[in-house]
Amino acid sequence: MALVITVAQRKGGAGKTMLAANLAAALAPTRRVALLDIDPQRSLTRWHGLRKERLRQAAAMSFSDLSGWRLAAELDRLRRGHDVVVVDSPPQIDTDARLAIRGADLVLVPLQPSPPDLWAARDTLKLAAAEGRTARLVLNPAPTASRLRSQGEAEIAEGGLALLGCALGNRATFATAFAQGLGVSEAAPKSRAAAELDALLAEVMALIG
């Protein structure tokens, strides 16, 4: 049965889809990966469409965008046929988001180091806790060094919230790769962005085995 990583966050603009795409792309060369896009904006669906045009250069992965009443069954189907399933969930707490979190082995909650992002993230963390799921905050995209980041990290620590030690920086490399249907590990494997992603992925996999 596959490990399921659900990327969830109520607030838009936190890099949720970018994180899901990069995790899947980095895992695809060595594992059977499936992507499940249940975000109504369908940005991940568009990314995967671009990716299909580049299959000779990029590792292939399964893809689904089934949601609603079919979601639970689809998630079970993907779990049976893959090693890892990465879910891009809706930017609100609704039935689909609850099901995606309920079926996850790990819930990743991306946020920028700002009060509005943290306020929204708390609701997602509460839902994960209610479902008995392991959840971690991920700074993404994060300034490499700033007063705002330091304040955000301090507020997270003071609140006793679980934050991954690795963060993804605010780097143009992520956007450039995404626009090509790629992850940074494929488009720029020697970049600082790829190094950050590798470190974050290693931390994630250590959490869920």
Image (cartoon, rainbow, N blue to C red):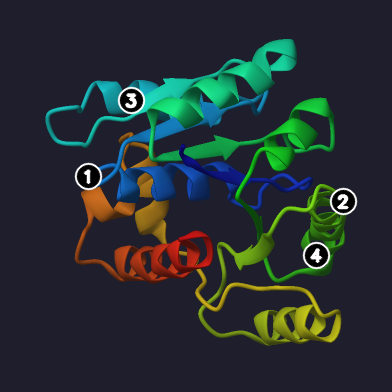
Amino acid identity at mark 1: Pro
- N-terminal of the pair, mark 1 or mark 3, is 1
Q: Look at label 4 and name its amino acid.
A: Leu
Asked whether the beta carbons under mark 3 and mark 2 sit within 8 Å of each other, the answer is: no
Give the number of the mark in front: 1 or 3. 1
Query: Whole-percent x and y of residue 112?
Result: 67, 64
SS at circle 3: helix
Q: Nearer the viewer, residue 144 or 164?
A: 164
Q: Earlier in the sequence, mark 1 or mark 4?
A: 1
Q: CA distance from mark 1 to mark 4?
A: 33 Å
Measured Cα–Cα span from mark 3 to mark 2: 37 Å
Residue drawn 21% across and 59% down? 189
x and y percentages locating residue 176 in the rendered image: 35, 47
How far across and down, in percent of the image, does residue 61 sit?
32, 30
Q: Residues within 10 Å of mark 4 (few under 14, many from 20)?
A: many
In front: label 3 or label 2: 2
Q: Is residue 183 visible?
A: no
Q: Nearer the viewer, mark 1 or mark 4?
A: 1
Residue type, numbered disc 2: Ala
Examine the rendered structure and indicate whether residue 90 appears above or below residue 146: above
Residue drawn at the location 42% of the way across and 50% of the way down: 23
The residue indicated by pointer 4 is: 118
Q: Out of 209 and 90, give the one closest to the viewer.
A: 209
Give the distance between the C-alpha atoms of the residues marked 4 and 2, in whole angstroms. 18 Å
Whether residues under marks 1 and 4 lie with C-beta atoms below 8 angstroms apart, the answer is: no
Please give the label number shown on residue 29.
1
> Where is mark 2, residue-wise?
130
Q: Secondary structure at mark 2?
A: helix
Label 1 environment density (alpha carbons within 10 Å; few <14, some 14–19, many ≥20): some
> 152 left or right of 42?
right
| Labelled disc at residue 50 | 3
